Image: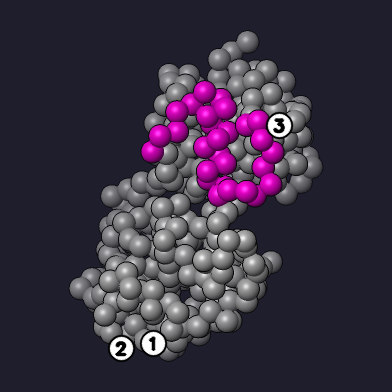
Amino acid sequence: MREDILIIKLGALGDVVMATGLVERILRHHAPRRCILLTGPTYGELFGSRPGLELKTFDRSSLRSTLATVQWIRRQRFRRGYDLQSNDRSGVMCGLSGIPERVGNHPRFPYNIHPQSHYTGQCHIHARMLEVLEAAGISTDAVVPCLYPSDQDREKVHAWLQARDLTDRKLVIMHAGASARRPEKRWPHFRELAVSLAQRGFVTVWAGGEEDRRTNADLTRGTGADATGAFSFLQLVALTAHAQFAVTNDSGPMHLLACGSIPVYGLFGPSDWRRNHAVGQRDRVLSLNRDEPVFRKTSLAELKTEHALRQLERDGIIQ
């Protein structure tokens, strides 16, 4: 039996970002053992600079690739596996892995190291993952998501801003997109907020990927600069060094931006902010049900621009 360690974290973007600090702590706990992270092809860059971590990407699009990956896991003869995904797919992979020590989120097969309580959404996802690591005997003091843009990432961002005469402007980053499967998570008042902030001297940088191109092009016609597809994940984190704050829907970029150096205001209504807000940004949640003891789903259309502006004013972000 070898002593190597397997870590599984396949997606989605926000969950992978929240797992970055967990992975780092696992590496520290098991050093100098060999640790391999199994993740989706899109997310390798988030971990590429971690010393002591090897990456294996996994295409989840077919049963054949899943079975091939299970066979690869069995050949490696890992000593311990951390299933930070803990969904049906990763659970089956763990069950078939042949790994003797299987760490996961649920007190049932295939995991033999796990928290004693069942997870039913009673706490934030990141807090629950800390419980998973503690069950495995790993200290979780000060574990937070962490991403490290390179010098090249920072240079790319600076060049982009310089080309648009934005290096000396007051910038706010906004992400108006959300999962195509969850259109109800898109706040309809971004344009109004950006115009109000422009009157206060702010320039909005509209961030997003290809799926946000049409939305951002429309918003940029009102105000701001279109950064659709301009930055990688780590470059988006580097962009925060030039901005004063960010406003986003409940989305992957919300978690990326929270790894930077600015306040990040997340908009919630259809999804439970208590379970999904960006780590470290709890006090900046924008939601009509923020102060209610039990989560109640609300429409983001009811969360008006004035609500966001009042919060920014109370926090001293704007005047």
Check contact, mark 3 vs mark 1: CB within 8 A: no
Badge 1 marks a residue whose secondary structure is helix
In magenta segment, residue 136? yes
Measured in 3D between alpha carbons, the distance from the residue under mark 2 to the one under mark 3, in whole angstroms, is 54 Å
Q: Nearer the viewer, residue 280 or 79?
A: 280
Look at the picture and state if 198 lies above or below 72.
below
Q: Residue at x 42, y 43 (%)?
A: 144
The residue that appears at 46% across and 83% down in the rendered structure is: 305
Q: CA distance from mark 3 to mark 1?
A: 50 Å
Query: Quick one: which residue is furthest to the left in this view?
Result: 168
- Could you say which is closer to the camera, residue 105 or residue 145? 105
Q: Which residue lies under the disc numbered 3?
A: 107
Q: Secondary structure at mark 2?
A: loop
Of the numbered discs in the image, which one, if any, rests on residue 195?
Answer: 1
Among numbered discs 2 and 3, the one appearing first in the sequence:
3
Magenta residues span 115-142
Asked if residue 47 can be seen in this view, the reply is no
